[in-house]
Image (tube, helix red, strand yellow):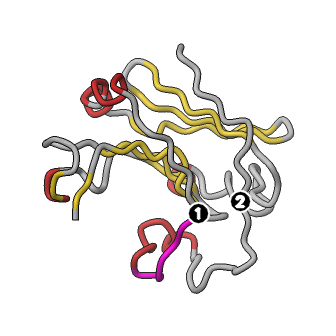
Amino acid sequence: GVWCWEMDIFEANKYVVATTPHKCWQAANTPISGCDRGGCGSNTWDADSNAFGPGKRIDTNRKFTQHTTFKDGKISVEYEQDGQNFSMNACNDSGYVWSMDDTFSKGMTIVMSYWGDNYSSMSWLDQRTGCSGDCDPNGQVTWSNIQINDA
């Protein structure tokens, strides 16, 4: 398979969301071995397991807002809902983020998808939260008011 530079803003299930940049050491569309599959990111569960999920500070059964900020070589994320906030640093490695600067400057394509796989393939996201098994066939997601602002 091939891999390319990637900026995951929101990879999630209802218990956790991860925000992760992935850089490559070679040109785009190179073998997977030429890119960082793990990336430099963080997730809400590791930051504070009581902050994000059904019935938690940011209740994922209801609409919430995510702000992702790229500043000074760092990526920070803030979630807001009904006056409640939760913030985390997604990638504090400024060298990692700056290494992606040229790719960001050239432009990246926004892709929004609703996807999943068997538990063994999704364990990187699901295992910490006890979320396993088949996805709810009636599961839903709504993305709205998408904005990209130049600081």
| Mark 2 neighbour class, 10 Å CA radius: few under 14, some 14 to 19, many 20 or more | few
Q: Which residue is mark 2?
A: 141
| Residue 72's disc number | none
The answer to whether the residues at label 1 and label 2 have Cβ atoms under 8 Å apart is yes
Q: Which residue is mark 1?
A: 114
**Image spot of residue 111 (x, y percent):** 51, 48
Range of magenta residues: 114-120
- State which quadrant residue 71 falls in: top left
Q: Is residue 136 left or right of residue 41?
A: right
- State which quadrant residue 108 falls in: top left
Front residue of this view, candidates 33 and 14:
33
- Residue 116 among those drawn in magenta: yes
Q: Is residue 96 left or right of residue 52?
A: left
Q: Amino acid at mark 2?
A: Val
Front residue of this view, candidates 19 and 101:
101
Magenta: main secondary structure: loop
Q: Amino acid at mark 1?
A: Tyr
Badge 1 marks a residue whose secondary structure is loop
Q: Which residue appears at 22% of the width and 44% of the height?
A: 28
Label 1 to label 2, Cα distance in Å? 8 Å
**Image spot of residue 70 (x, y percent):** 47, 25
**Image spot of residue 19 (x, y percent):** 48, 46
Q: Which residue appears at 55% of the width and 39% of the height?
A: 88
- State which quadrant residue 52 falls in: bottom right
